[in-house]
Image (cartoon, grey):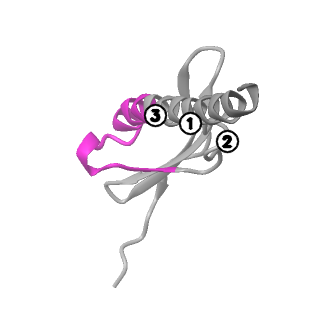
Amino acid sequence: MNTKICPFLLLLFFTGACAGIAERNQQRIEIVLARATFDLDCPKRELKVTSLDGGPEYPASMFGVSGCNQRATYLYDLNSGTALLNSPKEIKSEEL
């Protein structure tokens, strides 16, 4: 009986861990968006966030944000739970 329970418990543990990481990533994206909306003076609906690290194994802590012909890089600070601008705002040249 123990041999049947063990794989089930492992599966339950790992699927729960993945869901937790996805939820944390989404929370961090919302925090980054709130900060980027102010820094880039751009509405949230026009911003696109890209995770620059992280993945299914661990939460992301570095994000790229682009919108309103600008882009910037943010770090999520674990100690304060805030997003920190980690690059100068860059104006993207319009493609012809």
Query: Which residue is more in the foreground, 93 or 9?
Result: 9
How far apart in space, not on screen, are marks 1 and 3 (Cα)?
Answer: 26 Å
Residue 24 on image: x %, y %: 51, 29
Rendered image: mark on residue 57: 2
Query: Which residue is more in the foreground, 95 or 65?
Result: 65
Which circle's residue, 2 or 3, is located before the other in the chain? 3
Nearest to the eye among marks 2 and 3: give it: 2
Residue 14 drawn in magenta: no
Amino acid under disc 2: Glu
Q: Quadrant of the C terminus?
A: bottom left
Q: How many marks?
A: 3
How far apart in space, not on screen, are marks 2 and 1 (Cα)?
Answer: 11 Å
Q: Quadrant of residue 67?
A: bottom left
Q: Main secondary structure of the magenta part?
A: helix
**Mark 2 surroundings within 10 Å by alpha-carbon count, few (fewer than 14), some (14 through 19), many (20 or more):** few
Nearest to the eye among marks 2 and 1: give it: 1
Residue that label 1 marks: 15
Which circle's residue, 2 or 1, is located before the other in the chain? 1
User: Residue at (53%, 28%) from the top-left corner?
Assistant: 20
Amino acid under disc 1: Thr
User: Residue at (66%, 15%) from the top-left corner?
Assistant: 79
Residue 2 on image: x %, y %: 74, 25
The answer to whether 88 is drawn above or below residue 22 in the figure is below
User: Residue at (44%, 64%) from the top-left corner?
Assistant: 92
**Mark 1 surroundings within 10 Å by alpha-carbon count, few (fewer than 14), some (14 through 19), many (20 or more):** few
Residue that label 3 marks: 32
Q: Quadrant of residue 62?
A: top right
Residue 59 on image: x %, y %: 61, 36
Q: Quadrant of the N terminus?
A: top right
Magenta residues span: 29-50
**Mark 3 surroundings within 10 Å by alpha-carbon count, few (fewer than 14), some (14 through 19), many (20 or more):** many
Residue furthest front as drawn? 1
